[in-house]
Amino acid sequence: MKTHIPNFITCLNLLCGCLAIYFIFQQDLITAAYLVVAAAALDFMDGMVARVLHSYSEIGKQLDSLADMVSFGVVPGAMMLQLLTRSIETASASANFPEWLPFAGFLISIFSALRLAKFNIDTRQTSSFIGVPTPACTLFVISLPLIMAHDDFGLTGVILNPFVLLAITVLFSYLLIAELPLFALKFKNMAWQGNQVRFIFMGLSVLFFAIFNFTAIPLNLAIYILLSFLKPSSL
């Protein structure tokens, strides 16, 4: 029975991703964003539960990748499509952007699939990551409508710039498959020694959320990448 508990949690992750897609195409990006946050929490939880129960299985591994492809592959591509569509609608009429431009958002979906496929066969990524994980990329994308909905810093105009959204799309498509070493938030124990980077990142994340609200999500990702380049012994 305990073998199926992590798989059940993974299926809940998949359900959240499916519901997020529905709400995206209903133009309700905020509800979709909260569903992705729930999917990310469930994605973290299924691995943690599997480790606690020692209930690893090959079907669980494959199911996790398939669920992630929906929640952290299709969803951010669809979200970016909607954001690009809105940005073109609000742009100056003289800009004359091509009608196909919003579909460029699905580049994130394509490179997410490549990222997940690489992860499944890369033996270097058992305790760390090579390239930005798909949940991190997705959380960045879904933070954009949340930032606009609680825009304390006047960033809506910047976010709804088609060139900014295209730059984000291209940048994250690259970062997903880049040979970029990043630490994983997997605690083997709760001791400070050996977990310095993780504790510092979590502390800064909480601090940034308290100060910047949803604008902290992009900042936290930047800190995550920066800390990954620092050796634990130097912190």
Image: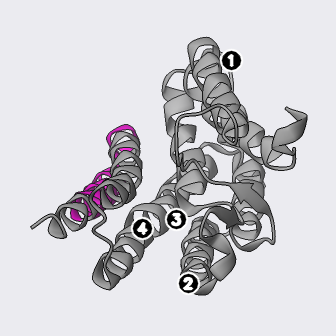
Residue position marked by numbered label 2 in the rendering = 117
Graded by Cα atoms within 10 Å as few (under 14), some (14 to 19) or many (20 or more), the crowding at tag 3 reads many
Sequence-first tag of 3 and 1:
3
Residue position marked by numbered label 4 in the rendering = 68
Amino acid bearing label 4: Asp
Residue position marked by numbered label 3 in the rendering = 77
How many callouts does the rendering have?
Answer: 4
Report if residue 191 is visible in the image.
yes
Question: Which secondary structure, mark 3?
Answer: helix
Q: Residue at the location (68% across, 17% down)?
A: 153
**What's the distance in space between the residues labelled 4 and 1, CA to CA?**
32 Å
Q: Which residues are magenta?
A: 11-32
**Nearer to us: label 2 or label 1:** 2
**Nearer to us: label 4 or label 3:** 4
Residue position marked by numbered label 1 in the rendering = 153
Amino acid bearing label 1: Phe
Question: Which secondary structure, mark 2?
Answer: helix
Q: Nearer the viewer, residue 138 or 9?
A: 9
> Which quarter of the picture shows residue 202?
top right
